[in-house]
Amino acid sequence: MSELLAQALYSGLLQGGSYALLALGLALVFGTTRVINLAHGELVLLAAYVAHTAETALGLAPPLAIPLALLVVCPAAAGVHALVSRIGADREINSLIATFGLGVVLTNLMLLLWHADARSTGSSWLQEAVVLGPLYSMRGELLFGAASLLLLGALWWWLARSWHGRALRAVAADRDAAALMGVDPGRAELAAFLLAGALAAVAGVALYSYGVVQPALGGALTVKAFVITVLAGVGSIPGVLLGAMLLGVAEALTVTLASSALQELAGMALFLLVLLFLPNGLLGATGRRG
């Protein structure tokens, strides 16, 4: 029983790393522009399909398809920004409607191009089991789990230490005051969307490397990313990692100790508990003070 629980915790932590990579782009845009991009999951899925095409048509291993995914997803993210930036009144609610509609368009576009068949990588190297004592995982999970931690650390450093990161935080705190100090709010928000697109591209390639993708998955990915963003608290990059890890472990323990049918219910229960007792998120207040 102890080995089973250890495996569940290990799998949950790895899954949490994947969830953090998935949510990082949405959390960045939401924390800096106060826009919830409901097309984020579709951007992640688009990158997964680019990786699939690169593997089947060009013979590239999924990790090597990341540059191609960046070339496709980053312009798409810039297009989302162009759509959102044209919204004047009631930006928050109208951006929800606009990005939801864009997500539907992207879903149907992917359905048209790649059809409704489920896709997964044919790379035996990524799917090969890695044994660490009594614990098992796929090599792809370990690879992109490490990538998730590196990207989280790099993004946190960029936001906290670089001039452009501080400018983006200034726009998030007070758009008009930032403009008076010489920061172009439009360019800062475009940088946030482009960076979120790059993160979505990596997340999509990771998803394809150890999972199964199909066109209807985009909405579920957006919901998962939004749940983690709320768990983290607005503006908290470390909170994204903590919330993702908690969600991954909660789902893994539920599958192991109860039933896989209750996996999503466990995540929603954790989400509601955090909203009830910590309405600012796990690290939301700390993130704003920082």
Image (cartoon, rainbow, N blue to C red):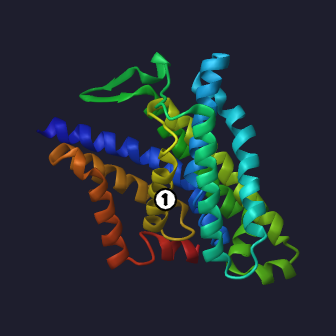
- Between 114 and 232, the one lying in front of the other is 114
Q: Is 46 drawn above or below residue 274 in the view shown?
A: above
- Residue 133: image location, x then y, percent: 27, 26
Query: How many marks do you count on the picture?
Result: 1
- Residue 155: image location, x then y, percent: 63, 54
- Residue 252: image location, x then y, percent: 28, 46
- Between 124 and 99, the one lying in front of the other is 99
**Which residue is pictured at 78% across the width and 61% down the height?**
82
The residue where tag 1 is placed is 240
- Between 82 and 256, the one lying in front of the other is 82
Whether residue 261 is visible, yes or no, is yes
**Which residue is pictured at 77% across the width and 68% down the height?**
85
The type of residue carrying mark 1 is: Val
Whether residue 28 is visible, yes or no, is no
Residue 63 lies in what quarter of the image?
top right
Q: Is 259 drawn above or below residue 53 in the view shown?
A: below
**Which residue is pictured at 45% across the width and 52% down the height?**
220
Secondary structure of the residue carrying numbered label 1: helix
Q: Left or right of 18: which side holds 36?
A: right
